[in-house]
Amino acid sequence: MTQPPTPFYMASNNLQPIRNVLITRFSALGDVAMTIPIVYPVCEANPNVSFVFVTRKVPAGMFVNCPKNLIVLGIDLNTCKGLFGLWKLARNLHFRYNFDVMADLHDVLRTKIIRTVLKFKKVKIVAIDKGRKEKKLLTSGKSKLPVKTTHARYKDVFSELGLNLGEEFTSIFANGEIPKSPIVPAKGEKERWIAVAPFSQHKGKEYPIEQMQMVINEMARWEHCHIFLMGGGEKERDIFDTIMRRYNNVLSLPHIKHSFADELVLLSHCDVMVTMDSANMHLASLVGLPVVSVWGATHPSCGFMGWHQALKDTVQLNLECRPCSVFGNKKCRYGDYHCMSDISPEMIIKKVLTILERDE
């Protein structure tokens, strides 16, 4: 007779089995994308446990090819504003899924309120240690020591809950079966596909578009090269439109209706991506695509490097004032953002060529 699977237990004196886990991470797209290389293996390594990941509506679309025991809920936060709204959200979630434990991967006021409600339901809670003090020392210039990565901090939460961490994440399409997408054309044998995501939410993390156009201009001249422009809103779409009109081998993805699944399929066929310290770096990392990442006000030592991305593929200047910001949202103390503008297009092009030659 087959023995029933052994349940996993909480690290507590009464050894209560873990059956249902709530995971929370509201936030920017990139922060949520960074959870996937940790959450997917944890779910797969604990098949008898049910996981519910609660996030915003838009980031929820990134969770493609999910483990069978993972439910992703995209919440419209406008419907649960204030203390009462969050109390109602927490109560309804617990009523529906009967959580044993909560893994708070965000640790902000919103998730703290949810935690408080669930504590009254006897839910065991572990929250991420963001290392705010260490990061403050880095951005103030008082330390140059790299802090623990965000991925490692996510792992710590699940480890403290007593859950198996699973095998190392390689790709969201780890089974080798990349689905087809109507927006992804057939790729020729000699073709080189390069994704370019030049925009960021904050100026301190954005390479000047005039200089990025010089990078694109050079790469567009390469034989068998196709460039895919990614990211941005309405204003950025107009810039892409201007760039796209100059070449017959440059395509703007924002001009095509598509989903996160389509974008991930496209990236899985690309050879390299050029991007900022932004969500696109983390999307590329989900399919194992090497990234040439351009860093300005922020720095990889703050812990937000893409999953399994190589430090040697970054483009950054060794300046005394870097990093001045963890998230790139602070104004430049000199007013010129020279940490970005002093990076030459040739520096980026050289890194791209190095990766392409490495894969030949």
Image: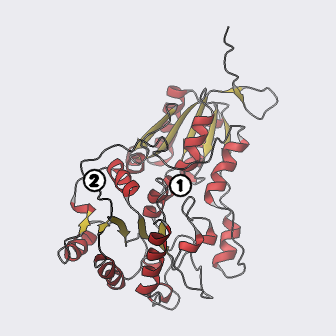
Asked if residue 238 shows in the view, the reply is yes
Q: Which colour scheme is used?
A: secondary structure
The picture places residue 329, in percent across and down from the top left corner, at 49, 74
State the image quarter where residue 252 is shown: bottom left
184 is higher (above) or lower (below) than 180: below
9 is higher (above) or lower (below) than 111: above
Asked if residue 276 shows in the view, the reply is no
- What residue lies at 61% left-to-right and 55% top-to-bottom? 151
Mark 2 sits on what residue?
A: 184
Relative to the observer, which residue lies in front, 288 or 68? 288
Amino acid, disc 2: Val
- What residue lies at 46% left-to-right and 72% top-to-bottom? 357
Relative to the observer, which residue lies in front, 28 or 312? 312
Cα–Cα gap, marks 2 and 1: 24 Å
- What residue lies at 56% left-to-right and 75% top-to-bottom? 325
Q: Quick one: SS at disc 2?
A: loop
Asked if disc 2 and disc 1 are in contact, CB closer than 8 Å, the reply is: no
Q: Quadrant of the C terminus?
A: bottom left
Indicate left or right for 310 with 14 as reference: left
Relative to the observer, which residue lies in front, 39 or 106? 39
Indicate left or right for 64 with 147 as reference: left
Marks 2 and 1: which is nearer the front? Answer: 2
Relative to the observer, which residue lies in front, 334 or 34? 34
The picture places residue 241, in percent across and down from the top left corner, at 20, 72
317 is higher (above) or lower (below) than 355: below
Mark 1 sits on what residue?
A: 34
